[in-house]
Every structure is written in C-alpha cells, then in structure tokens.
Amino acid sequence: MSRRLLIAGNWKMNLDSRGAAALARSVRHEVVQRKLDRDVLLAPPYPYLETVARVLEGTPIRLAGQDLSRHESGAFTGEVSAGMLIDLGCHGVIVGHSERREHGGDSDDTVRAKLERAIRSGLDAILCVGESESVRESGARESMAFVEGQLKAALANLSEEECAGALTVAYEPVWAIGTGRTASTSDAAAMHAHLRAVVANRYSEQLASRLRILYGGSVNADNAVDILGASEIDGVLVGGASLNMESFGTIYRAGAA
Ligand code: PGA
C-alpha cells in the first residue's frame, strides 16, 4: 500500500507574528507552485495560528497545534482546548512531543488523554513517540520495547474506527531532536516496521498498512532524500530546518519526481 508522504513543520517556540506570516507565505508559494504529490502541514505557536490560517486559506496545506489540553474547557489557566484549535482553523495537532513529555510533564497517561481528546474532537493527531539516549544505549530491542510501550499506552482506549484516517505516528528518537544526530535510515525503518506491526496486532493489517509513520529528529536539507526514500518512512516531522524556507523547501522537494 503506498502512503502519501507528509512533510510537517513544527515551528516550536520560534518566530514573531510577522516572521510566521512571512514563512507561511513562502511555504504557500512553494506548495501552490510545485503541486507535488505529498502533503504539507505547519504547526506554528498558538498565538500565530490565526495569522497562519489566513495565509493558508484555500490551499491544501494543513494547520496544526503543537499541543492541546486534555480537558474540554473550564478553569485550566494557560491551556488551549481542541475546540479552540478547530475554531482557529486547525485540522490537526501534535500530541506527546518529547519536549512536552520532558518540560511539560506529560506522562503516558496525559498523552493518552490528549490523544483521545484530539481525535474525539475531530482533530487529526500526530502522536510522537521515541526513546531517550539512555534507552537507545541499552540496545535496539530495548528501544523497540520502550517505544512500543509508549504507543500502546497512547492507543489504549481508542478504537480502530477512531484511529482510521485521524492518526499519524511520528517516531522521534529524543537523542536526535535538535542535536544534528539522526537515527540511521535503517534503524528508523526497522522501528517504523515494528510500530506498524504493533498497530496491526492491536487493530488490523488494514489500519496498519494505511497508517502514516513519520520520522523526526534533525531532518535537514542534506539527509531528507535518504530518509524519505525509505519505504517504511511516510514523511518527516521537521523542527529547526522548518524555520528556513531554503531548507524546508528542499525537504519538501526531496526525492520528488
Ligand atoms: P528537529 O526537531 O528537526 O529540530 O530535530 C524535530 C521535532 O522535534 O519535531
């Protein structure tokens, strides 16, 4: 089954409103001109969602939040709900990014609740999983077991129908994020194949074969062709290199016919 590639840019806590609008316009120009057979998604900081939504209106580029609250609404100062993201034009949301797990204290249970909230509210979700450096050092099998545990915990209560079409998984080894180090393409592909088998076991072959599994962690203009060329890798979640149109444009075009 061939899965359409997704090129996703996670802007993290960068840019200002002008910079966000300018970058979104550049991405729009590139995507609208080239019309490549791949999807593009941008995840700006919350305050710039509306600005970016306006720039992307009428284009196939999807807008996503970088996180969401596990709660529907109420006295949760500083939090942003799924409904608010949808209201601002988001189609999706990133859930369980390692920076939320590390700095925001998101446990596996919080990630599960956020994923359920996102999908049950009608958002597509990019669920991030990935092992730390110490887990990776303990071996490939240990890393697979660890990431499998994160994936199963997040999917514990979701049905196949809920996941179909709404779930994307991003394998992001923590030690590769923002470090300039990437997993080797063969290691990443092996992890992706393992995660796909976990989903096939938990749900069905059909869901597993349709599920997009992205790779993230120091993806850049130089390594994108190699990463996107692996058949198990269905796209990339790009942090640093998505902030610059030269590198993000190169990644978007990488390996395209
Ligand atoms: P990076 O970030 O590309 O800067 O390593 C990836 C991510 O955190 O999604």
Image (cartoon, helix red, strand yellow):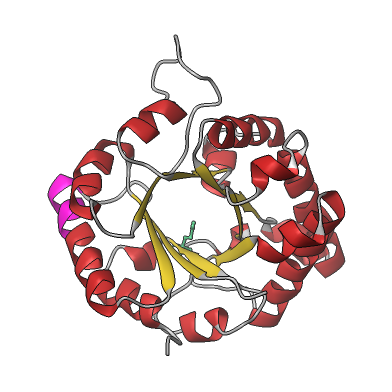
Q: Residue at coordinates 61% horizontally, 37% vertically from top-left?
A: 115
**Residue, x 85% and y 60% (percent of image)?**
142
Whether residue 243 is situated above or below residue 190 in the rendered picture: above
The quadrant the N terminus occupies is bottom right
Residue 32 image-quadrant placement: bottom left
**Residue 178 vs residue 70: left or right?**
left
Q: Position of residue 236 (x, y in %)?
A: 50, 67
Count of marks, rendered view: 0
Q: Residue at x 80, y 47 (%)?
A: 149
> Along the line of sight, which residue is nearer the eye, 109 or 131?
109
Q: Percent position (x, y) of residue 157?
A: 75, 33
Q: Which of the pair 84/97 is nearer the observer?
A: 84
> Looking at the image, which residue sits at the far bottom?
257
Query: Magenta-highlighted stretch: main secondary structure?
Result: helix
Provide the residue span drawn in magenta: 16-22
Q: Is residue 19 magenta?
A: yes
Q: Is residue 23 magenta?
A: no
Residue in front for this viewpoint, 74 or 184:
74
Residue closest to the far top: 75
Q: Is residue 256 visible?
A: yes
Query: In what quadrant of the picture does the C terminus appear?
Result: bottom left
Residue 9 left/right relative to 219: left
Q: In this rendering, is residue 168 above or below 251?
A: above
